[in-house]
Image (cartoon, rainbow, N blue to C red):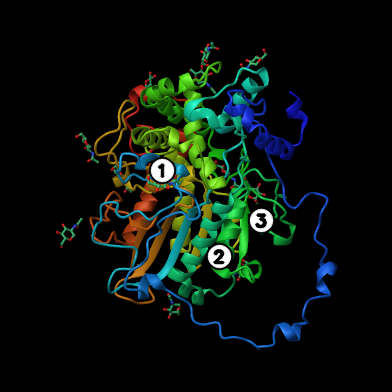
Amino acid sequence: MFFNLLPAFVSVVWASRISAAVVSGKASSFAGSTSTFQFPPTDVTATASLINSFFPDASEVDFAGPTPTGDEAESVATAPALSPVKGYFPLIRPNTSDKKGKAFDVVDSWANLSPMQSVKSFGLDNTTEQIPEGCKINQVFLLHRHGARYPTSGSSPATFAANVHSAAGNGTFIATGPLEFLNTWTYRLGAEILTPFGREQLFNMGVGFRVKYGDLLKNFTGLPVWRTTSEGEPVVPNQAILDLSTLNRAHADIRAGLHFAAGFFGVQSYQSSYYQVIGIEQDGFNNTLAPYDQCPNANNNISSLGGEATEAWTNVYLVDAQKRLIPFLPGFNLTINDVAAMQTLCPYETVALGYSAFCDLFTEEEWKGFAYGIDLDFWYGNGPGNPAVSAQGIGWVQELVSRLTQTQITTFDSTVNGTLVSSNITFPLYQPIYVDATHDTVISAILPAMNFTSLAAGGPLPLDHIPKNHTYKVREISPFASQLVGQVLSCPASDTPTHIRWLLNDGVLPQSGIKGCGDDPDGLCELETFIAGMKQRIKEVDFVFDCFANYTFSLANDTITNGQFPK
Ligand SMILES: *[C@@H]1O[C@H](CO)[C@@H](O)[C@H](O)[C@H]1NC(C)=O
Ligand SMILES: *[C@@H]1O[C@H](CO)[C@@H](O)[C@H](O)[C@H]1NC(C)=O
Ligand SMILES: *[C@@H]1O[C@H](CO)[C@@H](O)[C@H](O)[C@H]1NC(C)=O
Ligand SMILES: *[C@@H]1O[C@H](CO)[C@@H](O)[C@H](O)[C@H]1NC(C)=O
Ligand SMILES: *[C@@H]1O[C@H](CO)[C@@H](O)[C@H](O)[C@H]1NC(C)=O
Ligand SMILES: *[C@@H]1O[C@H](CO)[C@@H](O)[C@H](O)[C@H]1NC(C)=O
Ligand SMILES: *[C@@H]1O[C@H](CO)[C@@H](O)[C@H](O)[C@H]1NC(C)=O
Ligand SMILES: *[C@@H]1O[C@H](CO)[C@@H](O)[C@H](O)[C@H]1NC(C)=O
Ligand SMILES: *[C@@H]1O[C@H](CO)[C@@H](O)[C@H](O)[C@H]1NC(C)=O
Ligand SMILES: *[C@@H]1O[C@H](CO)[C@@H](O)[C@H](O)[C@H]1NC(C)=O
Ligand SMILES: *[C@@H]1O[C@H](CO)[C@@H](O)[C@H](O)[C@H]1NC(C)=O
Ligand SMILES: *[C@@H]1O[C@H](CO)[C@@H](O)[C@H](O)[C@H]1NC(C)=O
């Protein structure tokens, strides 16, 4: 109890001092306590005058004179091949899965908590991200997820830490064997915001996008207008275009937008190189990048189908791990949810702290089970198996059609925000480069809304085993820093776009599910055909019914694969 009253940094010091006692079997009473730190400290603020007197004056800084800026890159068109995103410096991959001498990267099993790595193929093996021979890129769309962040507030890792801490306070917590580290473990994660590694991912994404598509900047007549969401951050309504100087702190999404821009434009100029539109992410607000706030069935027992599916599967795949670990925590009621939380701590600690001792507690099979549990959560909660999901994605599709046809939206019957899209300041209709930042569950909703049916071909997903040909992998759909890219092309090269194709984390998506697109080996669809298909999808998806109707739907009869209530 005494330790609870001390500031966190004190208990960290004490932790190392009393580790000798722990080795002899005595647990500390601070195990599981939350430690936190803020920099700069609240009583220290930067004072420009303190250092300014040492600055060289402007003429000295510019001594060498202006330097040539060089031309824009467009490596998707000019390079003979592109380098895939691979690896996750500076995170340490735990050794877990190397024990049997097999090549198994645990990071690949973290599903939506995996860092984005390029997907090799979604079935179109003979094409790549590079634009097809004979085509020219005229325009590009990017819809991306934020990079690695802390867990959402009140989620299982924090609850597990609280349980440990409570038992430690009661003096009933003694961890031994592989769990001995828990005696001195403290909970060092925050909530919601990007981790340093997550910032790196977004910055790198911005750099990568500039190298691949920077040449399209030449066709802007004004500054780019890019969008993100506020994620519950208090944003003054109507202040849609952010004055960056007012931004002191922000959640993952806002920062995602800013770090992307910092990578794309460079820190010296990004604040004056584009406008950042921040849609309000709050219950009841229309926002296509946070559509669940305008969809009641995204927040009730219909949306919990995903959690139910994961829970059913957890009681299959984690039972052995629970049995194995219980003996090492005498006096602690180690539930299966605690074990699942320990597994979840592995990715979260790794992307925040660089390394996690929890990773080594589980076998390769259990890691595959973990990934499948999240695949189930997305499939039944935020993907093709949930009846309110295409409805959530359709607002962004309406905006896409508006942008592709340069036609203002006039009917507001989904999550589109009429105020924002009616202004050519907040929703310009011709931009060579569009960038929207959003969440994992929004990307996973937009894909079925657009009818990328090949992603859903393996469904419905069983709750008691991983199917042999399992293809719906959240690691490929919504990892940290996930990217859905639309390339608008002219084939043959001209100033009039003729085709479009889509890449999900660098893998080309087949468009065979979209009416009329056919089976092009490069994933191309004629632009007019694609637009007609999207217009038909907008008619097919019943936003009002799927999001607002009071219907009964359960896992027992959930065989849908299109994210719509069966009619
Ligand atoms: C991982 O295992 C290899 C081979 O067993 C060993 O050389 C290496 O030091 C281990 N790394 C860590 C971080 O434990
Ligand atoms: C890719 O090309 C090879 C060689 O032309 C062909 O055998 C194969 O079927 C193609 N694969 C796909 C998926 O089109
Ligand atoms: C930019 O616009 C000009 C004039 O319309 C056109 O010639 C050029 O091809 C365009 N560039 C791209 C990359 O589309
Ligand atoms: C700790 O003690 C309190 C009060 O007796 C009890 O409610 C709580 O369940 C105990 N926690 C654990 C983890 O044993
Ligand atoms: C649309 O967005 C504007 C600007 O963020 C906001 O003030 C307004 O409340 C939003 N409207 C709806 C219906 O959500
Ligand atoms: C252990 O936890 C489970 C699940 O929460 C609960 O049903 C059970 O009663 C608990 N057992 C003890 C001994 O507290
Ligand atoms: C918000 O969306 C609803 C449909 O869900 C629509 O009726 C309303 O007009 C929209 N409001 C704005 C300002 O876009
Ligand atoms: C934006 O809209 C205003 C008012 O309708 C119009 O005067 C202006 O030309 C438009 N700007 C662009 C770039 O379309
Ligand atoms: C996966 O295998 C099952 C059972 O053999 C089959 O019904 C299903 O169509 C297959 N799915 C894919 C995507 O190949
Ligand atoms: C979407 O997919 C469904 C099922 O495969 C199909 O019936 C429908 O025609 C498709 N709609 C469009 C517009 O592609
Ligand atoms: C939905 O319908 C059920 C059964 O008809 C009813 O019990 C429930 O109160 C309704 N819920 C809402 C939110 O209207
Ligand atoms: C699903 O099953 C429930 C009963 O469990 C039933 O009430 C509901 O109508 C069924 N829904 C569909 C779409 O078949």
Question: Which is nearer the eye, 27 or 280?
Answer: 27
Badge 2 crowding class, 10 Å Cα cut-off, few under 14, some 14 to 19, many 20 or more, is many
**Residue 144 percent coordinates (x, y):** 49, 54
Quadrant location of residue 65?
bottom right
Question: Which is nearer the eye, 534 or 361?
Answer: 361
Helix, strand or loop for disc 2: helix
At x 58%, y 59%, the residue is 259
At x 56%, y 86%, the residue is 68
**Residue 31 percent coordinates (x, y):** 63, 29
Does the closest atom of ligand 5 sit within 8 Å of the Cβ of label 3?
yes
Asked if residue 52 is positioned above or below residue 297 in the image, the reply reads below
Q: Which residue is mark 2?
A: 263
Badge 3 crowding class, 10 Å Cα cut-off, few under 14, some 14 to 19, many 20 or more, is some
Q: Is residue 112 left or right of residue 473?
A: right
Q: Is residue 93 left or right of residue 269?
A: left
Marks 3, 1: nearer the viewer: 1
Name which of mark 3 and mark 1 comes first in the sequence: 1
Location of the C terminus (image quadrant): top left
The Cα atoms of the two marked residues, 1 and 2, are separated by 32 Å
Q: Is residue 496 left or right of residue 180?
A: left
Question: Which is nearer the eye, 414 or 44?
Answer: 44
User: What's under tag 1, amino acid-wise?
Assistant: Asn
User: What's under tag 2, amino acid-wise?
Assistant: Gly
Q: Which residue is mark 1?
A: 95
At x 63%, y 87%, the residue is 66
Helix, strand or loop for disc 3: loop
Residue 119's mark?
Answer: none
Q: Which residue is mark 3?
A: 240
The Cα atoms of the two marked residues, 3 and 2, are separated by 22 Å
Q: Is residue 182 left or right of residue 553?
A: right
